[in-house]
Amino acid sequence: MTRTLAHTISCLAVLAALQSAASAQTAIPTVIPAAGKLTCGSGSGQIGSTTANLKVCLQRSAGIGRDTYSFLINDKSALQVADDDSLKGVSGTYEKTPLFLNCTSQTKPPKEVSEIMIRTYQRTMKVSAEQAREMAIKQDSIEIGRQCAARANNKVVLEVLFKFE
C-alpha cells in the first residue's frame, strides 16, 4: 500500500508540473494601448526553420482615425491591417512562410436590455423573443478589447489581448 501511495503521489506531482507548464505556455499577454502610441505584445516562435522574435502591435489613432494592427518578425513589419479589417484578417508571406493575422472583438454586454427594444426587433425582424434579445444585446455591447493571433504555416505563433480603457 505504501509503494502504491508513493507512486500515486509521484504521478500527481508529474501531472501538476505538466499542467503548470501547459498553462504557462497558453498565457496570452495582455496589453493596454494608449491613444497615439504603438503598443506591442511580444514573444518568440518558429517562423519557417528558425526561431524569431515576434510582436503583435497596435498603433492607436490619436483622434478619429483608424487603428492599425501589425505583426513584426525580428522587428520588421510582416503584416499590417487597419482597424475593422483586422476582424477578417490579412495574409502574406515572410521568407516563403505563409502568415495570417486576425483579431476577434472582445465585448461587454449591457447590464440590461429594454423590453421595447426586444419587441421592436421581434416585430421588424420577425424573430423569436430570444433571438430579438440576443440581437439587442449584441447591438448594445461595448467593445472592450481585441484578441489578435498571428499564424505561421497555419499555426498560432503569438496571441495578444489588447484591452481598451
Image (tube, rainbow, N blue to C red):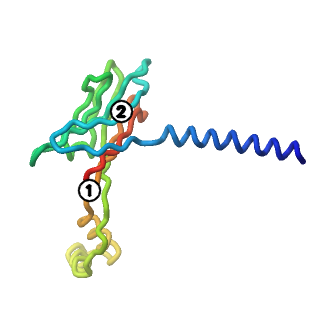
How many residues crowd around disc 1 within 10 Å: few (fewer than 14), some, or many (20 or more)?
Answer: some
Q: Mark 1 and mark 2 in contact (Cβ < 8 Å)?
A: no
Q: Which residue is pictured at 30% across the width and 49% down the height?
A: 163
Residue 92: image quadrant is: top left
Q: Which of the two marks, 2 or 1, is nearer to us in this view?
A: 2
Q: Secondary structure at mark 1?
A: strand
Q: Whole-Å distance between the Cαs marked 2 and 1?
A: 23 Å
Instruction: Please state the horizontal and vertical placement of residue 62, each as a whole percent of the image.
Output: 12, 44
Of mark 2 and mark 1, the one earlier in the sequence is 2
Q: How many marks?
A: 2
Q: Which residue is pictured at 71% across the width and 45% down the height?
A: 12
Q: Which residue is pictured at 32% across the width and 18% down the height?
A: 95
The residue to which callout 1 is attached is: 143
Q: Going by the picture, which residue comes out furthest to the left?
A: 64
Tell me: residue 117, above or below residue 14.
below
Identify the mark at residue 91; answer none if there is no mark.
none
Instruction: Please state the horizontal and vertical placement of residue 154, each as a whole percent of the image.
Output: 40, 33
**Front-most of residues 124 and 68:** 68
**Front-most of residues 75 and 88:** 75
Residue 91: image quadrant is: top left
Instruction: Please state the horizontal and vertical placement of residue 119, each as a whole percent of the image.
Output: 24, 80
The residue to which callout 2 is attached is: 42
Q: Which residue is pictured at 39% across the width and 35% down the height?
A: 158
**Front-most of residues 145 and 79:** 145
Tell me: residue 14, above or below residue 116.
above
How many residues crowd around disc 2 within 10 Å: few (fewer than 14), some, or many (20 or more)?
Answer: some
Tell me: residue 121, above or below residue 34.
below
Q: Amino acid at mark 1?
A: Glu
Q: Amino acid at mark 2?
A: Ser
